[in-house]
Amino acid sequence: MKLHRGMTDSEAAAAELGLYRAVLTLRDEDECKRFFADLCTPAELEALVDRWAVAAYLKDGLAYRKIHALTGVSVTTIGRVARFLASGSGGYSIALERLDSSG
């Protein structure tokens, strides 16, 4: 995590954990939509949505160029998402698998 202005490392870690805990309190898609609309700028939210869409397309086996044509996301960003999907922290995979199993 990058160093936050005016925060110690432990304060920044506590703030990060607080964010994750806040997300876990949200009960449905509407609450999530409202929370992220307040938390993120429109550009930040668009970037998150784009990356999530790319992750789903990659899981489905689509080629980078096809994903680019469908989303407008740069091939560089698609490659970055693919790299994290393959060897990141596993977050994309956990969420994608859980969504698949929930039907």
Image: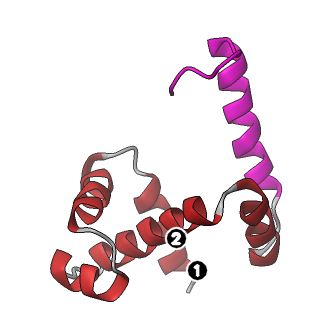
Tell whether label 2 touches label 1 (CB within 8 Å): no
- The dominant secondary structure in magenta is helix
**Quadrant showing the C terminus:** bottom right
Instruction: Give percent across and percent down for residue 13.
Output: 65, 24
SS assignment at label 2: helix
Mark 1 burial class by Cα count in 10 Å: few <14, some 14-19, many 20+: few
**Position of residue 77 in the picture relative to residue 30 (left or right):** left
Marks 1/2: CA distance?
A: 20 Å
Task: Residue at 75%, 67% (x, y): give it.
Answer: 32
Task: Residue at 22%, 79% (x, y): give it.
Answer: 61
**Residue annotated with mark 2:** 49
Mark 2 burial class by Cα count in 10 Å: few <14, some 14-19, many 20+: few
Residue 72 falls in which quadrant of the image? Answer: bottom left
Task: Residue at 51%, 25% (x, y): give it.
Answer: 2
**Is tag 1's residue or tag 2's residue first in the polypeptide sequence?**
2
Q: In this view, does 34 lie above or below 13?
A: below
Residue 15 falls in which quadrant of the image? Answer: top right
Tag shown at residue 63: none
- Amino acid type shown at disc 1: Ser
Foreground mark, 1 or 2, reads 2
Q: Residue 97: say if magenta.
A: no
**Which portion, as a residue range, is magenta?**
1-25
Tag shown at residue 102: 1
Instruction: Give percent across and percent down for residue 28.
Output: 79, 73
Q: Residue 15: say if magenta.
A: yes
Of residues 99 and 13, the one nearer the viewer is 13
